[in-house]
Image: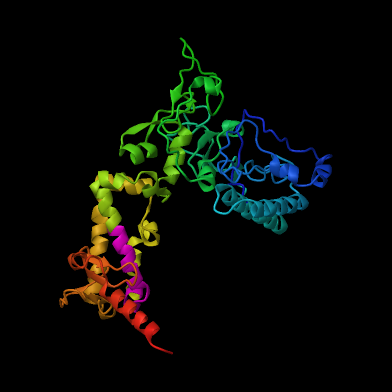
């Protein structure tokens, strides 16, 4: 199904404050109006309320929209069949809540996202369910394919060895989850790809530990009892989310922790649970980190990162030349950045892989080569692009300068380019802007 990969799953051990209505009372609940639905929130959730009275940190629950079932988190067949009327009512409720929510708030963004999902779900019901291949099994967002033959893997559920020559096993095509055939019906971990598609943002707190007591001394995933005693299951902490797991859910895998990189520029590998390992692996190449907002001092602390930022800003300026250059389009110059597509779209978003490449020095070499190729096309190879350069009006030098040159300064008002030294000597007073102001002043004084 189109949206069975989208998960809005509540914690397994926490009962929601608003229970889904039974089929008999569903019609009566719809008639009671939408005010009660809008005011309801989940029990036990910490809420930060802004000045407008809306909750920016709380996800929109299905109960708030009047849904009696979760259409997104569980596999097909787990609940009763969804009705078109219920989805239409939820869409109307969502529209009203969007109109009531203040602009530019997380609450409104979450509502818009939910509205899109509900409309697509309604469209999917009208078109009929998507056919699933006979050899594909879907559970908790996983897309399992049956495997046979030799294997050097371990079951993610029981942590036992998978003897491929003797046992059949299943492999998730999205996150790499593997398990025995007998363990398939017992899995409790939602597919990491579902979590990535729903919310690809990292946790930016360094190992936010609450202690075993906050987990009732149970594994955060399978709920196995964890106690520090002899002959008991020893807890293992995940350095990414700070939670404790049993050895079956935590194999002492190691990964780079995003929060430690962004706050301390620390790339040391640390132990994480299996769920965190799969999540970090899938989101590693996604540009979801705005370093300037998270830790702006990192650019002054790490010289290589600051250099990468400057190169990206200059490449974005060069992009404007290529968009109107026929020769650049024919030679497909911008495809030099096809492995780093976000470098063409903006200059402030980074992936964790980008930061690792900055640390290793690979990204600077890559961007320097691309920058030199782009500059060569504009300054030497293409006459059309070269004619878009500037002559410094202050020093009147014959040399043609461009806005992406390291020694160039651009007027923030009219966009005229000067030498940086010349512009500073002029106290950043643009001659072109002065002429335009004088001309406008003269035209106002002349009688009409």
Q: Residue 360 at what x, y percent from top left? A: 25, 45
Splitting the image into 4 quarters, where does residue 204 fall? top left
Rendering coords of residue 233 (x, y %): 48, 17
Look at 54% across and 53% down and name the residue there. 104
Q: Which residue shows up at 61% across the image and 47% down it? A: 4
Q: Magenta includes 287? A: no
Query: In this image, 31 relative to 389: left or right?
Result: right
Q: Residue at x 30, y 54 (%)?
A: 309
Q: Residue at x 80, y 42 (%)?
A: 29
> Quadrant of residue 126 in the image?
bottom right
Q: Quadrant of residue 386?
A: bottom left
> What secondary structure prevails in the magenta region?
helix
Viewer can see residue 63: no
Q: Which stretch did the figure color magenta?
A: 311-329
Question: Residue 195 location in percent, x, y?
Answer: 53, 43
Q: Nearer the viewer, residue 84 or 4?
A: 84
Would residue 263 appear left or right of 158 to someone viewing this image? left
Q: Please determine whether, in this image, residue 98 is positioned above or below residue 150.
A: below
Identify which residue, 254 or 373, lies in the foreground: 373
Q: Is residue 331 above or below residue 368?
A: below
Res. 217 in view: yes
Position of 142 compared to 353: left or right?
Answer: right
């Amino acid at each position: 199904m189109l949206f069975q990969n989208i998960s809005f799953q509540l914690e397994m051990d926490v009962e929601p404050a608003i229970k889904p209505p039974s089929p008999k009372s569903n019609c009566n609940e719809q008639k009671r109006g939408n005010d009660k639905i809008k005011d309801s929130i989940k029990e036990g959730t910490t809420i930060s309320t802004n000045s407008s009275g809306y909750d920016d940190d709380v996800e929109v629950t299905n109960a708030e929209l009047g849904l009696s079932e979760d259409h997104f988190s569980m596999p097909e067949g787990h609940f009763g069949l969804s009705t078109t009327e219920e989805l239409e009512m939820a869409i109307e409720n969502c529209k009203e809540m969007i109109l009531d929510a203040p602009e530019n708030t997380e609450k409104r963004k979450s509502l818009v996202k939910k509205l899109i999902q509900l409309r697509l779900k309604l469209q999917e019901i009208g078109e009929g369910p998507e056919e699933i291949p006979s050899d594909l099994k879907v559970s908790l967002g996983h897309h399992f394919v049956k495997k046979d033959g030799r294997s050097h893997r371990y079951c993610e559920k029981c942590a036992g060895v998978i003897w491929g020559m003797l046992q059949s096993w299943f492999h998730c095509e999205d996150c790499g989850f593997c398990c025995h055939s007998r363990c398939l019906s017992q899995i409790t971990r939602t597919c990491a790809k579902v979590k990535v598609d729903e919310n690809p943002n990292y946790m930016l707190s360094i190992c936010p530990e609450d202690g075993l007591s906050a987990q009732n001394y149970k594994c955060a995933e399978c709920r196995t009892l964890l106690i520090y005693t002899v002959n008991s299951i020893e807890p293992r902490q995940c350095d990414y989310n700070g939670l404790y797991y049993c050895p079956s859910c935590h194999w002492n895998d190691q990964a780079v922790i995003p929060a430690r990189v962004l706050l301390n520029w620390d790339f040391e590998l640390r132990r994480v649970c299996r769920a965190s390992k799969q999540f970090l692996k899938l989101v590693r190449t996604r540009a979801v980190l705005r370093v300037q907002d998270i830790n702006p001092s990192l650019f002054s602390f790490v010289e290589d990162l600051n250099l990468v930022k400057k190169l990206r800003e200059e490449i974005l300026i060069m992009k404007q030349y290529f968009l109107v250059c026929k020769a650049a389009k024919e030679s497909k110059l911008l495809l030099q950045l096809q492995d780093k597509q976000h470098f063409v779209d903006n200059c402030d978003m980074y992936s964790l892989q980008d930061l690792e490449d900055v640390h290793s020095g690979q990204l600077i070499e890559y961007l320097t080569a691309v920058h030199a190729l782009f500059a060569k096309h504009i300054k030497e190879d293409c006459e059309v692009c070269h004619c878009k350069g500037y002559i410094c009006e202050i020093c009147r030098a014959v040399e043609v300068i461009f806005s992406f040159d390291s020694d160039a300064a651009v007027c923030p008002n009219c966009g005229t380019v000067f030498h940086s030294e010349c512009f500073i000597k002029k106290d950043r007073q643009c001659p072109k802007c002065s002429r335009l102001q004088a001309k406008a002043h003269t035209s106002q004084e002349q009688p009409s």
